Amino acid sequence: MALHPVNDRLKVEVATNEFGFNEESGGTETGIVVEVPDMLIYLSFHSFAFENSIMNESNLKKIQSYYNQFLGKRIYWEMLQDRGRKIKEGEKEFVYLQMTDLLAYSDDTEDNAQVINQVGSAGSFNLS
């Protein structure tokens, strides 16, 4: 049974190696968008601001249409945004990423750009 994203989440497949472990050490910051929710009821941000999207069907259709353009494309997000959002389905791993966490995308699914690790040993971002 496949899981589907709800609310304002993208379902993003992340790469695993032949042993089933995530290729990146500690986290994932890139993957391929495989599903966008069929219906949105809001678009949120980490500040819990909803703007004027909550139950605004006209705005939500535009937002959904915008994020549909990323289906099948490689996307990138800020470090640590995958924490608590990664789910293994069979042999594949997926991140259910908040739509507003998307930083960049590439039409080339084999693109090898990487988010640079700026997280210190204590788990917080380095300030230098």
Image: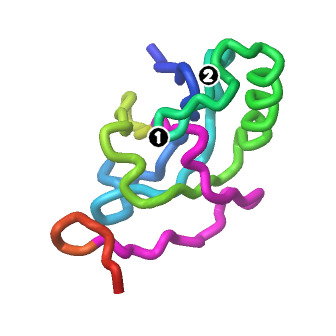
The percent position of residue 78, horizontal first and vertical second, equals 48, 59
Crowding around mark 1 (Cα neighbors within 10 Å: few <14, some 14 to 19, many 20+) is few
Between 121 and 19, the one nearer to me in the picture? 121
Crowding around mark 2 (Cα neighbors within 10 Å: few <14, some 14 to 19, many 20+) is many
Dot 2 amino acid type: Tyr
State the CA–CA distance, disc 2 to disc 1.
Answer: 14 Å
The percent position of residue 117, horizontal first and vertical second, equals 38, 74
- The residue lying at 76 percent from left, 34 percent from top is 68
- The residue lying at 33 percent from left, 46 percent from top is 83
Q: Label 2: which residue?
A: 42
**Circle 2: element type:** loop
Q: What residue span does the magenta drawing correspond to?
A: 96-119
- The residue lying at 45 percent from left, 75 percent from top is 116
**Circle 1: element type:** loop
Name the residue at the bottom extreme: 128
Q: Is residue 111 left or right of residue 27?
A: right
The percent position of residue 24, horizontal first and vertical second, equals 37, 63
Q: Which of the 4 image quarters holds residue 107?
A: bottom right
Quick check: marks 2 and 1 in contact, CB under 8 Å? no
Q: Label 1: which residue?
A: 47
Q: Quadrant of the C terminus?
A: bottom left
The percent position of residue 54, horizontal first and vertical second, equals 64, 18
